[in-house]
Image (tube, grey):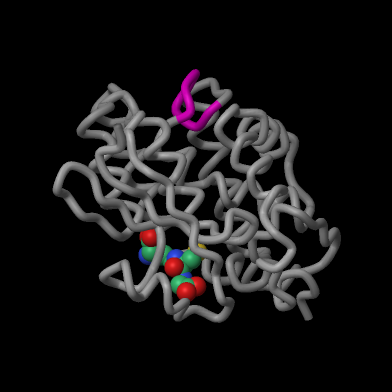
Amino acid sequence: MAEGRLVIGTKRYSSWSLRGWLMVKLAKLEVEEVVVPLAGGGGTEAIRAISPNGMVPYLEHRGARMWESLAIAEYCAEFAPGLWPADRAARAHARSIASEMHAGFRGLRMAMPMNLGRTFPGRGRTPDALADIARVEAIWAEALKASGGPFLFGRDFGLADAMYAPVVTRFLTWQPDLTATTRTYCEAVRAHPLVAQWYDEAAKEPAAWLLEKYENPG
Ligand SMILES: N[C@@H](CCC(=O)N[C@@H](CS)C(=O)NCC(=O)O)C(=O)O
């Protein structure tokens, strides 16, 4: 029986929802999934009516209420501590890059929004986006070198990977020039069963949920 609910937005577009959903699935929390189609441009009325900050993901579980994906990450790690690396220094590293994702990369997010159903090769390459991509590639290369991959902190897909999974989808959609290390990591993330499930479910969303601004970006 469900012990709460996870409220998320349109799977095709909602990058933060993907993060929260992956975390909750990885921790195996039993919650009902509530998908609210994004209105576009923020301020979706149905989300504001449910979530304290008017945003998704929003999680309720056994009397706890959480918004902000890092709060959801830490809650999930209470149930599944292995979602952060076991080694203390690696764990500090994982939390640092997860926080860096949460706080930054605005240039990338603005120029290359998530759209799981389209490809826009060669587009969106603003200077800010390219600078963010260079930093993301450096972050991934450092973690993968230390861990040996295929995921950022080793064999298992963890919370740091969940934080960066929407960046992988952006790279697959917008196809900037990437190093071989980045491309290999993107393939590993795309092939993860939960990421594949999210893509499959996104492809089944109704056409009425499509938003012009993401389907035909300027
Ligand atoms: N800082 C938040 C960001 C959440 C966020 O920006 N979510 C977007 C969807 S990807 C949202 O809910 N926007 C409101 C809307 O589109 O109505 C987090 O870490 O979860």
Question: Does residue 176 appear in this view?
Answer: no
**Which residue is pictured at 34% across the width and 47% down the height?**
96
Residue visible at 59% across and 27% down in the picture = 193
Front residue of this view, candidates 183 and 141? 183
Measured from the top left, where is residue 55 in percent x and y?
39, 68
* Image location (x, y in percent) of residue 58: 34, 57
The foreground one among 17 and 149 is: 17
- Dominant secondary structure (helix, strand or loop) of the stretch shown in magenta: loop
Can the viewer see residue 79?
A: yes
Assign ligand 1 to one image quadrant. Answer: bottom left
Range of the magenta residues?
151-157
- Quadrant assignment for the N terminus: top left
Count of marks, rendered view: 0
Q: Is 72 displayed left or right of 174 in the figure?
A: left
Image quadrant in which you'd find residue 62 = top left
145 sits left or right of 133 in the view? left
Which sits in the foreground, 198 or 69? Answer: 198
In percent of width and height, residue 71 lies at: 26, 52
Which residue is located at x 85 percent, y 62 percent? 122
From this viewpoint, which residue is outermost toward the left?
A: 63
Q: Can you say whether 158 is above or below 176 in the image?
A: above
The residue furthest front is 1
| Residue 162 part of the magenta-drawn span | no
- Foreground pick, 9 / 205: 205
Q: Quadrant of the C terminus?
A: bottom right
Residue ID at (48%, 34%): 143
Rendered location of residue 17, percent (x, y): 47, 54
